[in-house]
Amino acid sequence: MFNLTKHATRPLVAGFAVLATTAGALPATAGPTEVKLNQETTIGGIGVACTGVGQSRNQPQWLTYPVKLVFADPKGLLLADVTVSLTDANGAQVLQVRCGGPWVLLKPPPGKTFKAEARLTQPGTAPRTNAVRAPARGQSTVVFTFPDAKA
């Protein structure tokens, strides 16, 4: 879980995210919430984690997330440092996160489909989109392939 006392510079951002969540969606002008590698948090009622690097990617808690977003180049090489936005069926943004790793894990409400848009911080790469829906059981993997990424 996100430990606010360890991140004393983030109370305003965390408070803003809670305030925006009560309004139903994050405003389009809000910047992404940074989720540190191997950290978990909740944004807009959706569990979020950032991982995929080293031995920590094999931790059992990551299997409790029904959706795994993976970022790769056309050869399948993993790409890191991504911003992900999730919008609901009405087009309202429900979260925007930045992850320094190649996986973003999500615990969206069951039965709802969201649109996920991923943007690499690498210049010259176009954003990619995919539909995201939590499966009834297990974990679904959604791969975002960036054909214009440089390894």
Image (tube, rainbow, N blue to C red):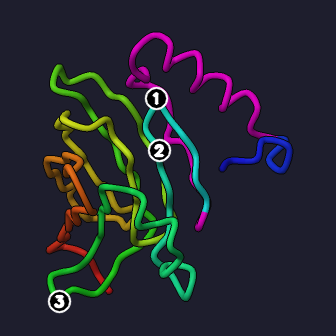
102 left or right of 134 in image: right
Front residue of 57/148: it is 57
Residue designated by label 1: 44
Front residue of 56/118: it is 56
Q: Which is more foreground, mark 3 or mark 1?
A: 1
Q: Residue at x 19, y 40 (%)?
A: 115
Q: Earlier in the sequence, mark 3 or mark 2?
A: 2
Residues under numbered marks 3 and 1 in contact, where contact means CB atoms less than 8 Å apart: no
Look at label 3 and name its amino acid. Answer: Lys
For label 3, the crowd category at 10 Å Cα-Cα, with few meaning under 14, some 14 to 19 and many 20 or more, is few
Q: Secondary structure at mark 1?
A: loop
Residue designated by label 2: 47
Q: Estimate the spatial distance between the alpha carbons at disc 3 and disc 1, rounded to whole Å.
A: 34 Å
32 left or right of 138 in image: right
94 within the magenta span: no
Look at label 1 and name its amino acid. Answer: Gly
Label disc, if present, on residue 125 of the rendered structure: none
> Horizontal and vertical percent for residue 135?
19, 52
